[in-house]
């Protein structure tokens, strides 16, 4: 049956769009999780109609189909663990419409996040989702995992900044969902359901993005603290101010030490944590906002406070923060990067617990992330594929996730579930909710061909 289906797909696409040679397919079996599974075939689609054609044939012959963007995700969501077809959207790179009057942009899924930002900026706008991988991740991937980034603190995640979608579900049928306006309550909100579903419900072929006007001014600040609790106290106070910052990033003492060693940065020797705060607005004079942030940081643990006075200084601060994950990857190529979320008041509880885990399991743990909304990246510098380190890492993660749920948190804020977290989601999602989600998937994907083996525990 599978061979018949692959033959049918081969006839349906040009030879430069369909590949089965393992040498050609190999590279399409991985993502940034460092996991790999070889697909039976790779199909390069260039239009909505070609997505329909591919999904229809996969449905007819029962062939698993995994949508793929630029493979920058860290959870294994783009890995074809059951073989079948990888449907790559990388050639669908058109910005179909830039509608300044209605503050909207219509794009294909293969457009890079950075290209969206550049086009929006040329018209005086931006699209708020700004993941660290924005230079090379695509909009389809952003939609797949509900990507966010530092600006989500003020402007929201991908869900809050997408108006409508066109998608192909598991039967090959096309659905249109959402609106072209900023308000609309007709029917169920399938747009928000599809966003974050990691290709398990359908393959998005077109998205209408909601743009936001560029602020006239920004100010970026940096504060060092002697310990985690002092920084956490400042974060809580920052988020109770009448001004919501457009960024509030946290870096722990281990991360500071690594930046000092590997980036030759001049950082305080006794710093146990650091936060970066950014405010923006319509006025060039943001001094009152800066003063509010400074007052929020005033506690006995504050070591130093500074404000970037030039664009060069601002860029340098963000470069240090955004390069941290890759720097850690270079030190520990198979490191585990979890993006858990807890309520603001529980940030110190979680951070202190990670240090307890580090000692108990003898694992270096580095924490950083989007502290303003409690979304922390907990990095375990260990090789999960190592026969000795792997079991230790797994038990450490199990305990970490138990603690997150105990603190009324969530197991993922922006990276998604994929393979890496599928066996833990039952810690957060109740059995009745899980059953309902499986029934919803069955309506979209009756043969379970859409990215099978992801999202739900085995």
Image (cartoon, rainbow, N blue to C red):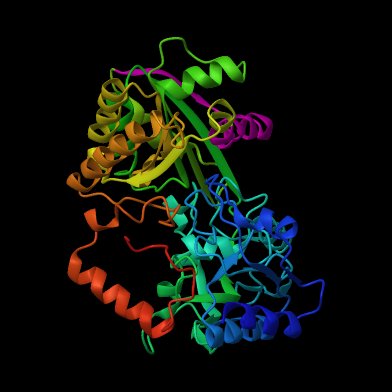
Classify residue 124 as left or right of residue 62: right
Q: Residue at x 62, y 15 (%)?
A: 264
Q: Nearer the viewer, residue 258 or 121?
A: 258
Residue 377 appears in which quarter of the rendering?
top left
Give residue 305's position: percent from left, percent from top.
Answer: 45, 22
**Up-down relation of residue 275 to residue 121 (above or below):** above
Q: Is residue 24 visible?
A: yes
The residue at the point 74 percent across, 59 percent down is 24
Instruction: Determine which quarter of the picture holds residue 349.
Output: top left
Q: Which of the two residues, 277 or 145, is positioned nearer the viewer here?
A: 145
Magenta highlight on residue 316: yes
- Judge left or right: residue 44 versus residue 233: right
User: Residue at position x 26%, y 46% from top?
Assistant: 343
In percent of the image, x 42 and y 62: which residue is there?
454
Task: Residue 413 in the image: state x and y as whole percent.
Answer: 39, 52
Residue 225, x across and y down, in percent:
37, 20
Residue 440 sits above or below residue 125 on the image: below
Which quadrant: the N terminus? bottom right
- Tally the marks: 0
Left or right of residue 116: residue 294: left
Q: Nearer the viewer, residue 250 or 289?
A: 250
Is 399 inside the magenta-drawn segment? no
**Residue 211 can be seen, yes or no:** no
What residue span does the magenta drawing correspond to? 301-326
User: Which quarter of the rendered picture does the C terminus lie within?
Assistant: bottom left
List the single residue furthest toward the top. 269
Which x, y percent locates residue 253?
41, 21
């Amino acid at each position: 049956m599978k061979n018949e289906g692959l033959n049918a797909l081969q006839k349906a696409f040009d030879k430069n769009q369909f590949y089965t040679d393992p040498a050609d397919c190999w590279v399409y079996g991985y993502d940034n999780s460092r996991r790999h599974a070889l697909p039976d075939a790779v199909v390069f689609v260039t239009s909505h109609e070609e997505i329909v054609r591919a999904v229809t044939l996969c449905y007819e012959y029962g062939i698993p189909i995994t949508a793929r963007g630029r493979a920058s995700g860290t959870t294994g969501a783009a890995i074809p663990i059951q073989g079948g077809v990888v449907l790559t959207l990388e050639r669908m790179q058109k910005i179909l419409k830039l509608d300044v009057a209605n503050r909207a942009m219509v794009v294909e899924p293969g457009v890079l996040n950075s290209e969206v930002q550049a086009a929006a900026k040329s018209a005086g706008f931006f699209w708020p989702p700004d993941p660290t991988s924005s230079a090379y991740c695509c909009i389809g991937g952003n939609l797949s995992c509900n990507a966010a980034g530092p600006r989500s603190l003020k402007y929201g995640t991908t869900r809050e900044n997408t108006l409508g979608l066109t998608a192909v579900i598991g039967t090959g049928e096309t659905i249109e969902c959402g609106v072209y306006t900023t308000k609309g309550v007709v029917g169920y909100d399938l747009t928000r359901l599809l966003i974050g579903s990691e290709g398990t419900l359908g393959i998005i072929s077109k998205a209408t993005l909601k743009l936001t006007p560029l602020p006239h001014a920004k100010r970026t600040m940096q504060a060092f603290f002697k310990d985690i609790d002092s920084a956490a106290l400042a974060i809580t106070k920052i988020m109770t101010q009448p001004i919501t910052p457009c960024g509030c990033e946290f870096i722990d003492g281990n991360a500071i030490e690594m930046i000092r060693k590997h980036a030759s940065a001049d950082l305080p020797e006794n710093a146990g944590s650091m936060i970066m705060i950014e405010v923006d607005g319509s006025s060039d004079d943001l001094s009152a906002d800066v003063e509010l942030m400074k007052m929020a940081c005033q506690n006995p643990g504050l070591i130093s406070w500074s404000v970037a006075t030039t664009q060069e200084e601002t860029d340098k601060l963000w470069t240090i923060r955004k390069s941290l994950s890759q720097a850690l990857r270079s030190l520990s190529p198979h490191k585990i990067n979890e993006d858990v979320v807890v309520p603001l008041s529980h940030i110190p509880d979680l951070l202190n617990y990670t240090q307890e885990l580090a000692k108990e399991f003898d694992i270096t743990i580095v924490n950083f992330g989007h502290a303003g909304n409690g979304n922390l990246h907990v990095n375990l510098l260990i090789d999960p594929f190592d026969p000795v380190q792997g079991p230790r890492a797994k038990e450490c993660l199990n305990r970490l996730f138990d603690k997150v749920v105990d603190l009324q948190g969530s197991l993922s804020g922006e990276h998604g579930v994929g393979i890496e977290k599928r066996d833990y989601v039952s810690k957060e999602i109740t059995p009745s909710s899980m059953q309902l989600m499986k029934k919803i998937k069955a309506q979209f994907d009756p043969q379970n061909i859409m990215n099978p083996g992801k999202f739900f525990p085995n």
